[in-house]
Image: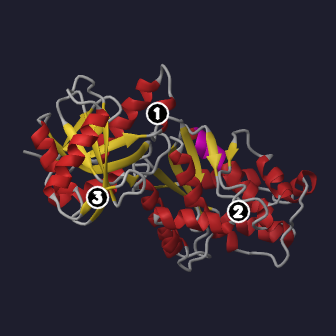
């Protein structure tokens, strides 16, 4: 008798040494949380995790959820049976093609099984050839490869394909970061990239209502919900930049607008990051993509914060970023036509090579600048995702 199971394989955890258990325990908790509302059982063995005792109707839902768990390398839907050779052979015949070629690849973690891997390959191949007319063995480029995994637990798993998962490191193993989440293409990808390395995220969205619409904020919330599929502990905060932007527009030179707004955003972000227990700030900047992302602009922006600022997209071009956005499901939402706060009072010719001295000179023209920052922080909105 045999039934369907889902074999889960982790990736980089193989590289970990004495602290491997720490990463594995978090990964297991993340898998349990992802599948907690589905009727299935989880088995965690050495190097192999298995989902079993589930209804076939929810198999695709289980697979889709597991593909979003960072730290997992791949998965396979397999048929499970016991050690009896005839039982294993029956499953192999069932999985074999009716026409074309095949190959058997056996892995024995249970070394006491009476047939070694080569003997198992040969015996199963002969059984298939006896049972199915019109098939042949091809060891180099088969139409179907039947993998046979003989485990110490008494189970044997047979499968013909693997589905890639998200890879990376388990979420929750690399500290906390504050993601500056706009409604654009780049910042959700930046958050995904850091979450993939194990970082928990808090998203901070800046808006400029009524210059930007409520729909623009809802778009950012929708993007946060897409990210939450990959990092379930994601939190979100929203803050208004309206008064700060109005003050900059009234008191400062127009071509300094973007630089001054970015510095205000970073000041607010650092306060929020420290309050939320985040050890870094994350944004979606890519070097040279727009005026605020030149080397000089980034230097001037960074100068107002002490926390490290991570820019995982800094060396990527737009097409590379779009490819990832499409893969994670954020692209279609990101290109919906709603303005964000960076488009408010946008100058015709923004400064591309600012200096700290000149920028500070402009900030000094705003008499109540520190109070505006405090007011923005004090009125932060908590968004329930």
| Of pointers 2 and 3, the one earlier in the residue sequence | 3
Q: Label 1 neighbourhood size at 10 Å, few (<14), some (14-19), many (20+)?
A: many
Q: Nearer the viewer, mark 1 or mark 2?
A: 1
Q: Give the residue number, with chain letter if any, for mark 3.
A: 136
Residue 317 numbered mark, or none: none
- Residue located farthest toward the left when viewing the structure as drawn: 1
> Distance between the Cα atoms at labels 1 and 2?
46 Å
Q: Give the residue number, with chain letter if any, for mark 2.
A: 244
Foreground residue among 99 and 76: 99
In the rendered image, residue 117 lying in the magenta stretch gets the answer no
Q: Give the residue number, with chain letter if any, for mark 1.
A: 13
Q: Nearer the viewer, mark 2 or mark 3?
A: 3
Q: Label 3 neighbourhood size at 10 Å, few (<14), some (14-19), many (20+)?
A: some
Query: Which residue: 38% across, 50% down?
Result: 139
| Of pointers 3 and 1, the one earlier in the residue sequence | 1
Q: Is residue 313 left or right of residue 351?
A: left
- Residue located farthest toward the top when viewing the structure as drawn: 18
Secondary structure at numbered mark 3: strand
Query: Which residue: 56% across, 77% down?
Result: 338
């Amino acid at each position: 008798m045999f039934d369907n199971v889902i074999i889960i394989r982790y990736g980089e955890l193989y590289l970990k040494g004495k602290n491997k258990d720490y990463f594995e325990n978090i990964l297991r908790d993340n898998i349990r949380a992802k599948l907690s509302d589905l009727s299935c059982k989880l088995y965690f063995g050495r190097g192999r995790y298995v989902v079993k005792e589930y209804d076939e109707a929810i198999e695709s839902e289980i697979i889709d959820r597991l593909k979003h768990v960072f730290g997992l390398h791949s998965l396979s839907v397999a048929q499970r049976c016991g050690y009896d050779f005839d039982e294993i052979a029956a499953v192999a015949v069932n999985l074999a093609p009716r026409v074309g070629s095949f190959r058997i690849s056996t892995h024995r973690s249970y070394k006491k099984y009476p047939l070694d891997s080569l003997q198992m390959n040969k015996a199963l191949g002969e059984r298939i050839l006896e049972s199915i007319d019109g098939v042949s063995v091809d060891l180099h480029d088969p139409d179907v490869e039947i993998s046979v995994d003989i485990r110490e637990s008494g189970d044997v798993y047979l499968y013909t394909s693997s589905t890639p998962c998200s890879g990376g490191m388990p979420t929750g193993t690399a500290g906390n970061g504050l993601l500056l989440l706009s409604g654009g293409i780049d910042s959700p990808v930046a958050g995904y990239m850091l979450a993939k390395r194990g970082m928990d995220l808090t998203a901070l969205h800046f808006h400029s209502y009524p210059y930007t619409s409520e729909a623009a904020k809802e778009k950012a919330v929708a993007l946060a919900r897409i990210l939450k599929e990959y990092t379930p502990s994601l939190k979100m905060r929203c803050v208004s930049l309206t008064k700060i932007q109005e003050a900059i527009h009234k008191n400062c030179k127009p071509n300094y607008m973007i630089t001054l707004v970015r510095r205000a955003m970073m000041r607010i972000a650092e306060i929020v990051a420290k309050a939320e227990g985040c050890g870094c700030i994350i944004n979606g900047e890519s070097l040279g993509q727009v005026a605020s992302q030149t080397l000089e602009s980034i230097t001037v922006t960074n100068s107002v914060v002490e926390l490290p600022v991570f820019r995982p997209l800094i060396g990527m071009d737009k097409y590379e970023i779009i490819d990832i956005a499409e893969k994670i499901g954020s692209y279609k939402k990101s290109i919906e036509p709603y303005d964000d706060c960076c488009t408010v009072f946008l100058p015709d010719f923004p400064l591309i090579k600012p200096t700290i001295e000149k920028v500070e000179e402009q900030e000094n023209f705003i008499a109540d600048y520190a109070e505006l920052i405090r007011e923005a922080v004090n009125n932060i909105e908590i968004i329930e995702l």
